[in-house]
Image (cartoon, rainbow, N blue to C red):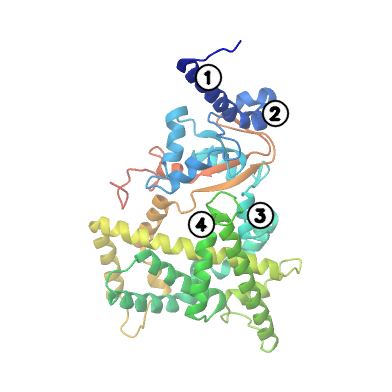
Amino acid sequence: MAIEMGPLSVLVSIAASFMLVRYLLNNVNWWLYESKLGAKQYSLPPGDLGWPLIGNMWSFLRAFKSTNPDSFVDSYIARYGKTGIYKALMFGKPSVIVTTPEGCKKVLTDDDKFTPGWPVSTVELMGEKSFVSISYEDHRRLRRLTSASVNGYEALSIYITYIEENVKSSLEKWTNMGEIEFLTEMRKLTFKVIMHIFFGATSANVREGLEKEYTSLNHGIRAMRINIPGFAFHKALKARKNLVAIFQTVVDQRRIERKGRTPVTGKKHKDMMDALMDAVDENGKTLGDDDIIDIMLMYLNAGHESSGHITMWATYYLQKHPEYLQKAKEEQEEILKKRPSTQKGLVLEEVRKMDFLSKVVDETLRLITFAPFVFREAKCDVNINGYLIPKGWTALTWFRNVHYDNDGGGKFGNRNYKMIGPN
């Protein structure tokens, strides 16, 4: 005998089915990652692992594409309280988000318990020989061999004249262009400078081609790892392939050129490419082509993105706070007053005297937090703030919360600090 279902029964069945599917989806990640921990799962920090495969990535990407990137972690604080540590599924791995200064310090400095844990997608795009995927020992070795060429006052002294000339010529050019997109122009300028540091002279066409590839690469780093045409990660993989091919050609050409010239020695200037090829560690080990290409790709990416953005934001904040813009101008005018009449252009000693401008840059770095987090993987079970980070899980040090913490202390550690901070 057939049983007829009335409209109410149909609605109840649909609602029950929907709730069952939702329950299953909400608990798949618990079964995959938490249930295997046994009793230890009850020591995990508060939070949720989101939906299967996707995890918490949709809400993360939505927040970072909005005008309020802090809304992602703020939602955890609103739901679970200010515990300073939360569980999530990020970039395909069970993770713990750490938001306190003490917790971040432990994750970053305790090399006995943590190792680099960048997502597979980042390693694929940056390269297996880049800093994001090599061992701690190799990381220290490569930083020692390469950082002197691009970091610190000694490196700045080599390129200061080139930088000043290009900044002045760019400002004059922008003055005659009418309305401009400032970030685009700043990225072109900073990319030109870092290309000079790495390769010496380069044509505008080469720089523009490389910059387009880097733009695609960066979109993929922040995207989900979906290697299908039309998705950002797929386009980024193609960009990496193109960049590697270009850099291999540059490396091959430079090796040919070096065979026919006297090596650069002592304090004579050599660009980053020569420095990488000449680099030898204490064991007599040199860098191969793969090492050099991945290091160049990584450093150029850092120069392309961070320098242009930070300069743009510093300019924005100074315009927003005219009292600090005036103070920065007065500092520069005072330096110019003391410049000898015989001196042509900026010198390193003058840069060292730009105390207030240095604080403006520091405060901008705090506010923007261009690299919002770092990935580390737990080598063993670790306890932070009374909560467990299981072996194999990723710990994300969430710098934005540290930099914006009202209780963080320090000169620039407070959201309400009013040098050039937000209203």
The quadrant in which residue 242 appears is bottom right
Give the farthest residue toward the bottom: 260
Residue 12 placed where, x, y %? 49, 18
Q: Nearer the viewer, mark 4 or mark 1?
A: 1
Q: Secondary structure at mark 3?
A: loop
Identify the residue under disc 2.
36
Identify the residue under disc 1.
13
Amino acid at circle 3: Ser
**Mark 4 or 1 closer to N-term?**
1
The quadrant in which residue 82 appears is top left
Answer left or right for 207 relative to 316: right
Could you give the CA–CA distance between mark 3 and mark 1, rounded to whole angstroms? Answer: 50 Å
Instruction: Tell me the crowding category of disc 3: few under 14, some 14 to 19, or many 20 or more residues within 10 angstroms, Cα based.
Output: many
**Mark 2 or 1 closer to N-term?**
1
Q: Quadrant of the N terminus?
A: top right
Residue 325 vertical placement versus 26 (above, below): below
Identify the residue under disc 3.
133
Residue 318 placed where, x, y %? 29, 59
Say whether residue 154 is visible. Answer: no
Report the disc number at residue 219: 4
Residue 391 vertical placement versus 182 (above, below): above
Amino acid at circle 1: Ser
